[in-house]
Amino acid sequence: MSEGGKPLSIGAPEPTEFKIRGLLVKEFFDERFIRLLEEKIPDIKFEHVCFNRVIQEGDKKKLGEGLYIAHETPEDEMASITTIGAQKTDTTRIFITLATEFINEKRASK
């Protein structure tokens, strides 16, 4: 029981990471995808297979949230399992939605 006799209420955890089967990073990760990310997620900066949001505070910039697209292990790459994630649930939703739409469009145009 919490102070005042009321029970604590803890919300259900929301995912910040998704494993996608049947997808290789090199299948979709290109300049067009990076441009779409830059449009949808403000202040994103590409760094290898990881991105960081850079937050402007007055005259200073600080490192914000990290986002990533990766094969976590060589076995994942061999099995075409890609992990997509971010530190915040809202950003993960934007990221996964954008990736899914982009990949489906790219596959449909083949």
Image (cartoon, rainbow, N blue to C red):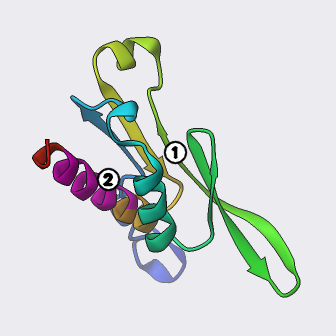
Within 10 Å of disc 2 (Cα), the crowding (few <14, some 14-19, many 20+) is some
Q: CA distance from mark 1 to mark 2?
A: 12 Å
Label count reads: 2
> Seen in the image, is 67 located left or right of residue 61?
left
Within 10 Å of disc 1 (Cα), the crowding (few <14, some 14-19, many 20+) is many
Seen from the viewer's position, the closer of residues 64 and 46 is 46
Find out whether the residues at labels 1 and 2 contact each other: C-beta distance under 8 Å.
no
Q: Which residues are magenta?
A: 95-106
Q: Amino acid at mark 1?
A: Tyr
Residue 65, compared with residue 26, is above or below; it is: below
Which mark is first along the chain, 2 or 1? 1
Q: Is residue 48 part of the magenta span, yes or no?
A: no
Residue 78, compared with residue 88, is above or below; it is: above
Badge nearest the viewer, 1 or 2: 2
In the image, what residue occupies the spot 59% across and 44% down? 50
Residue 52, compared with residue 2, is above or below; it is: above
In the image, what residue occupies the spot 50% across and 83% down? 4
Residue 100: give x, y in percent of width and height: 24, 52
- Residue located farthest toward the right when viewing the structure as drawn: 59
Q: Is residue 102 part of the magenta span, yes or no?
A: yes
Residue 65, compared with residue 58, is above or below; it is: above
Q: For mark 1, give the secondary structure.
A: strand
Residue 53: give x, y in percent of width and height: 64, 63
Q: Which residue is mark 1?
A: 68
In the image, what residue occupies the spot 39% across and 32% down? 26
Seen from the viewer's position, the closer of residues 7 and 68 is 68
Occupied quadrant, residue 3:
bottom right
Instruction: For the C terminus, give its image quadrant.
Output: top left
Q: Which mark is residue 99?
A: 2
Residue 66: give x, y in percent of width and height: 60, 53
Occupied quadrant, residue 40:
bottom left
Instruction: For the N terminus, give its image quadrant.
Output: bottom left
